Image (cartoon, helix red, strand yellow):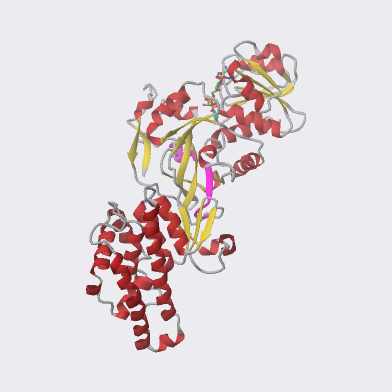
């Protein structure tokens, strides 16, 4: 997989520059029993990313893959995982410190993370917008919970209203009915007001402590951490009020029962992720992405975040096409061509458990293959093959697509003919009759296919096989039901040399070869015939 790696060992004294980040090929991470493996769609940059890498928080190990936030699709689950299944669309803040060693990893095509740090992503947010929320959303929510201001009648001052944490905090507090005061520079005042802040103070012009003196606020939530903030906060707080800070600190004892607490985000908290999901889905919280960068431009993304002037978040797009999930019993048959098309085109297709889904949701009462891709749920093998071909071979013209769908449909005709024989009680008893009937199917279809097959190269004249070629390969060689039927019927490939040669060429195409070498389904013979 592709992942961002930080070159060299970073010691406290070293000065980090974003150029130290490069994209490298790394192994897909292994996962524990209580973890999910996520195919990452998107991530985000948080100031903590570059603070960690510049050694401000302590030394980090060489070769670390950074990145806290991610959104993506679950592609595998550990044995003890109960809340997620393959194909779920999720978001997470993946940071961990097992035995004191920092573990991140969201700037990669795959990340393994604990089930209890993962939540279902809001259904109304695309992956790129969802990925920017977890760390700042959790921090803002937990800060306001600690300040006990998520209620009608509470008064809170949020310092730094236009940053990632501030934007979330304003909206979360407003959604609970609190009155919100906040600070930002003049250029961001209208934006911050549009999020619902009741009073916005331009910190470049006015001193918030003077403007809000004697307001008797319940809480000051500090996301900026400037020197001198704590004594100023005392002037605007009520007796027993609280200062909750994610930046800065003080050891001073404070008057009138006022307390100060610096806290770190607790990312092991899926209930909080679910609260954020509800807020987003009900339209009460949004977090704009100022700019999104591909993985290769990670250094530019860091530079923007390090400017300290970001409004909203800096996004990282990792994978543009998320894997689809195929639900089909684990043998070739009607599901195998979909698997082969996905493999030939290099798109992710993961196996779901048919028992996990309700066929009626896919508009299918029968056991045909089902496919889920994002919000799309569909059934019927040829329809699925045509859809996957759109993703796998995006450059084909409409006539080329027609050739592909034609051969996929032919494959269906052939398999339907073979199934009629295999699932006929009389034929099960009468082997000679079965052989005769299977041969009839092959003799009806194979000459027609042979006539269409190209002498060399592939059907659509591309440098790679497309669905038509893969369909012929399946008809020739996929064990169930074609390979078994061809053997029993005694198909003589000398009569179909173009078909045979095309199937072999297709199987030798690198991506196809790799798939066939590890596929347990292509060679499966479930009836042992
Ligand atoms: N303790 C924790 O667990 C925890 C968790 C998350 C983040 N953090 C820390 O919290 C800080 C904020 O994070 P973030 O993600 O929200 O940062 P961010 O998105 O990069 O915040 C940038 C914003 O800060 C504003 N800003 C700068 N100086 C300001 C000032 N004096 N008064 C008011 N606003 C000011 C800027 O607005 P203008 O351009 O309008 O000035 C800009 O919009 C970072 O230092 C981060 O490391 C800590």
Residue 367 percent across, percent down from the top left: 51, 69
Q: Which residue is drawn at 60% across and 27% down?
A: 166
Ligand 1: which quarter? top right
Q: Locate the N terminus by quadrant.
A: top left
Q: Check the image and report above or below for 440 versus 317.
A: below
The x and y percentages for residue 337 are 39, 62
Q: Measured along the vertical axis of the image, is residue 42 above or below residue 53?
A: below
Q: Where is residue 508 in the image (x, y as percent from the top left)?
A: 26, 58
Residue 99 colored in magenta in the image: yes
Horizontal and vertical percent for residue 444?
A: 35, 76
277 to the left or right of 416: right
Classify 274 as above or below 439.
above
**Residue at the spot x=42%, y=52% of the render?**
390
Q: Nearer the viewer, residue 245 or 454?
A: 454
Q: Is residue 347 visible to us here?
A: no
Q: Which of 295 and 365 is in front in this view?
A: 365
- Residue placed farthest to the front in the image? 399
The image quarter in which residue 134 lies: top right
Tell me which segment is drawn in magenta. 85-101
User: In the image, is residue 421 part of the stretch drawn in magenta?
Assistant: no
Number of numbered discs overlaid on the protein picture: 0
């Amino acid at each position: 997989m592709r992942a961002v790696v930080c070159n060299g060992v970073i010691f406290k004294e070293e000065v980090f520059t974003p150029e130290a980040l490069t994209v490298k090929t790394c192994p897909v991470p292994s996962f524990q029993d209580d973890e999910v493996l996520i195919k990452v769609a998107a991530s985000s940059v948080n100031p903590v990313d570059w603070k960690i890498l510049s050694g401000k928080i302590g030394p980090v190990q060489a070769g670390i893959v950074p990145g806290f936030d991610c959104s993506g699709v679950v592609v595998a689950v550990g044995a003890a995982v109960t809340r997620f299944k393959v194909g779920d669309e999720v978001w997470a803040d993946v940071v961990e410190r097992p035995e004191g060693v920092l573990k991140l990893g969201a700037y990669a095509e795959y990340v393994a993370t604990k089930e209890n740090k993962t939540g279902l992503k809001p259904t109304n947010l695309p992956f790129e917008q969802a990925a920017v929320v977890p760390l700042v959303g959790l921090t803002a929510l937990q800060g306001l919970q600690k300040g006990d201001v998520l209620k009608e009648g509470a008064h809170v001052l949020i310092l730094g209203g236009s940053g990632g944490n501030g934007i979330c905090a304003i909206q979360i507090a407003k959604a609970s009915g609190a009155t919100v005061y906040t600070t930002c520079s003049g250029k961001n005042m209208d934006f911050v007001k549009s999020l619902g802040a009741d009073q916005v103070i331009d910190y470049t012009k006015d001193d918030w402590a003077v403007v809000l003196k004697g307001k008797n606020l319940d809480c000051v939530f500090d996301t900026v951490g400037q020197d001198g903030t704590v004594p100023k906060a005392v002037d605007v707080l009520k007796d027993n009020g609280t200062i909750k800070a994610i930046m800065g600190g003080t050891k001073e004892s404070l008057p009138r029962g006022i307390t100060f607490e610096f806290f770190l985000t607790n990312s092991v908290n899926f209930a909080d992720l679910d609260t954020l999901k509800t807020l987003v889905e009900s339209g009460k919280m949004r977090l704009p992405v100022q700019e999104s960068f591909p993985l290769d431009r990670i250094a530019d993304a860091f530079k923007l975040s390090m400017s300290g002037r970001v409004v909203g978040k800096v996004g990282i797009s990792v994978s543009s096409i998320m894997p689809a999930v195929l639900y089909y019993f684990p043998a070739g048959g009607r599901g195998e061509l979909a698997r082969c098309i996905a493999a030939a085109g290099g798109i992710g297709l993961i196996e779901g458990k048919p028992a996990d889904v309700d066929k009626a949701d896919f508009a299918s009462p029968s056991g045909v293959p089902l496919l889920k891709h994002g919000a799309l749920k569909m059934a019927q093998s040829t329809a699925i093959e045509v859809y996957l071909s759109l993703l796998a071979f995006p450059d084909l013209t409409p006539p080329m697509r027609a050739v592909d769908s034609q051969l996929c449909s032919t494959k269906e005709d052939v398999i339907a003919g073979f199934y009629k024989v295999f699932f006929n009680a009389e034929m099960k008893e009468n082997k000679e009759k079965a052989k005769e009937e299977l041969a009839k199917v092959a003799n009806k279809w194979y000459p027609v296919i042979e006539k269409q097959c190209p002498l060399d190269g592939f059907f659509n004249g591309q440098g790679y096989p497309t669905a038509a070629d893969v369909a012929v390969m399946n008809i020739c060689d996929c064990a169930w039901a074609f390979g078994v039927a061809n053997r029993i019927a005694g198909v003589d490939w000398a009569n179909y040399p173009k078909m045979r040669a095309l199937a072999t060429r297709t199987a030798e195409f690198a991506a196809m070869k790799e798939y066939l070498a590890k596929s347990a389904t292509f060679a499966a013979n479930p009836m042992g015939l």
